[in-house]
Amino acid sequence: MDRTGKIAVVTGAGGTLCSAIAEDLAAQGYRVVLVGRTREKLEVTGKSIREKGGTCLILTADVKNLEQMTALREEVRHEFGLCSVLINGAGGNQPDAVTTYNAFDPEELSPENKGRGFFNLDMTRFLDVINVNIMGTVIPCQLFARDMVAAGGGSIVNFASMNTYRPLSKIPAYALSKAGISNFTQWLAAYLAPANIRVNAVAPGFFLNDRSRKMLLDPDSESGYSPRGANIIRQTPMKRFGEARQLLGCVNWLIDDEKADFVTGITVPVDGGFLSDSGL
Ligand SMILES: NC(=O)c1ccc[n+]([C@@H]2O[C@H](COP(=O)([O-])OP(=O)(O)OC[C@H]3O[C@@H](n4cnc5c(N)ncnc54)[C@H](OP(=O)(O)O)[C@@H]3O)[C@@H](O)[C@H]2O)c1
């Protein structure tokens, strides 16, 4: 397919996974819009794209902020034109929305307790995580699908997670939001099918990023993994964390209007077998 000049908007393009996706799309000839809140992170991806002869536009915005994203869409239309591919990679978790207990412990209800159980979670932080993952996907979909309607079609890829299928311990807000992504992906796929817009999601297994590297690795341990990292590796039949490049084939297939033109509403795990192993 000739991708030359087609416009792809990639949110979270300064991050671990979507920087690789943005660079790959640019290498295929897409004009890529790099979206995130921190310009410096996006500049790194942009520099790499331009050095290889690709074309990109760097725009900062908070994906859960309708006003900022509306202005961003106007700028994309003005600078580049109508978006035909949207990759919704912006998202994540935050420490205050994570419990320090795996399961209920009566001490979390004691006034002296310093830990964070479900009963001590700050609902504002909880909602922040829901907002960035859910509204940070819904808002770009609403804005850029409008362009796709005008262009006669398009493709959207959302970011789910292993939590979409079964919640991991300690991260209820993140798990809930990623379960919602799969549900919304199905809903929007059905809704936008008459407009020739396909909507799918990728569910990465465990890929190291700046945040998870600290949580999952421990250079002082014999294995090199923290206890949580070791648990994940034990549960992953391929016995390793994923690398961003290993998502490219899945994303490229999902956005391919010839090879995947009857594929919509699905969430595809790319997880080294994590979901296939019962752990027994
Ligand atoms: N890594 C994994 O193992 C894994 C597994 C399953 C799912 N995922 C999902 O895959 C996606 C990408 O993950 P990643 O590992 O590449 O994470 P990452 O390295 O932390 O990148 C996420 C990017 O999203 C941007 N972002 C966060 N909040 C934003 C907001 N409100 N507005 C605009 N941009 C925002 C961040 O940049 P700024 O902070 O500068 O805005 C960051 O560059 C996320 O949705 C994540 O939940 C990752």
Image (cartoon, helix red, strand yellow):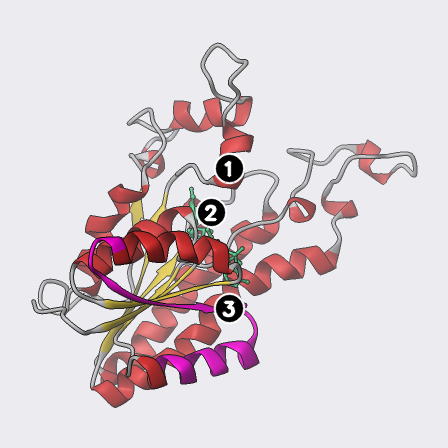
The residue labelled by disc 1 is: 212
Mark 3 residue element: loop
Rendered view: 39 above or below 239:
below
Tell me what residue is drawn at x 48 percent, y 27 percent: 229
| Label 2 C-beta lies within 8 Å of the nearest ligand 1 atom | yes
Query: Do the numbered discs 3 and 2 sit on residues whose CB atoms are within 8 Å?
Result: no
Looking at the image, is mark 3 or mark 2 nearer the viewer?
3
In the visual, does 230 lie left or right of 151?
right
Q: Quadrant of residue 8?
A: bottom left
Kindly report the distance in space between the C-alpha atoms of the residues bearing marks 2 and 1: 15 Å
- Quickly name the residue at label 2: 163
Q: Residue at x 43, y 36 (%)?
A: 208
Q: Amino acid at mark 2?
A: Asn
Q: Residues within 10 Å of mark 2 (few under 14, many from 20)?
A: many
State which region is magenta: 51-76
| x, y percent for residue 254 | 21, 60
Going by the numbered disc 1, the residue's amino acid type is: Ser
Q: Is mark 1 within 8 Å of ligand 1?
A: yes
